[in-house]
Image (cartoon, rainbow, N blue to C red):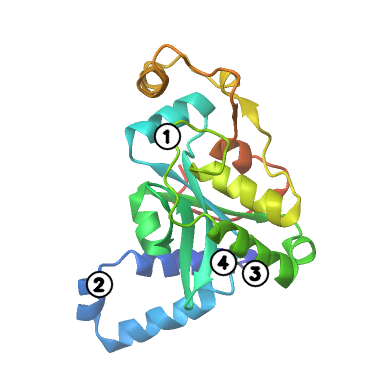
Amino acid sequence: MLTAHQSKTSLLQLFLGVLLLSAAGLHQAGAKSLSNARQLAEKVKKILHDGDLIFQNRRTKQGRAVEYATGSRYSHMGIVFIRNDQPYVLEAIKRVTYTPLRKWIKRGRNHLFVVKRLRNAGKLLGPEKTKRLRTEAEKHLGKRYDTLFGWDDDRFYCSELAWKTYFRATGLVIGAQKKLADFNLTHPAVRRRLARRYGNHIPYQMSVVSPADIFHSRLLVTVTVQNPF
């Protein structure tokens, strides 16, 4: 007998499998399949909440470097918001933007993703703070990606956007900031990225928050895992 949580997780995984079908495939499946997909979309909205944090592996050189430096398989993240009855991920990529969940998942290696949520979110967030999360995050829409991982608000990298959004909207510190020197910088792929970004002036004492730091925060609980290793 599946628990209620397992049933919800299975439903979410089924829904996301439908999302990953191409538009052509859905068209060929006919009106019945489209109707089923819409029904699943309605159900998944009850599982995914505004403010959920979603993590994945990026199939990029930078993604690999982040994995080596942090010792984590999760190199990219974003914040889930429901818009026009559909799930989106607000992320810092080339710019801070909303990306449809289906498209976001397809970019990840093996379509792996993990969704996490604030522990006791129902009590700690509530409608007003959830609205503040969205408002705070949307202040930065259109800003460019920060390739130098600075801590100002002119540009953003993915985990910086999530960290600042939660801190400013709720006062919660989700994931500890570290110095760049605290990460494992010995791997050749990491050293190449650092040399390309900073030349001979690597800012070892610069404050950084990584996707892994947020992922392992004790303030979060796992909602669902898709295709785990």
Which residue is under mark 3? Answer: 4
* Residue that carries the numbered disc 4 in the rendered image: 48
- The amino acid type of the residue labelled 3 equals Ala
Residue lying at the far front in this picture: please name it. 154
Name the side, left or right, on which 226 lies relative to 50.
left
2 and 3 marks in contact (CB < 8 Å): no
Q: Is residue 221 left or right of residue 83?
A: right
Q: Residue at x 35, y 47 (%)?
A: 110
- Element type at mark 4: loop
Instruction: Specify the amino acid type for callout 4.
Output: Leu
Say which mark, if any, is on residue 106: none
Eyeballing the image, is 78 above or below 6? Answer: above
| Rendered view: 130 above or below 166 | below
Nearer the observer, disc 4 or disc 3? 4
Q: CA distance from mark 4 to mark 2?
A: 23 Å
* Numbered tag placed on residue 147 in the rendering: 1
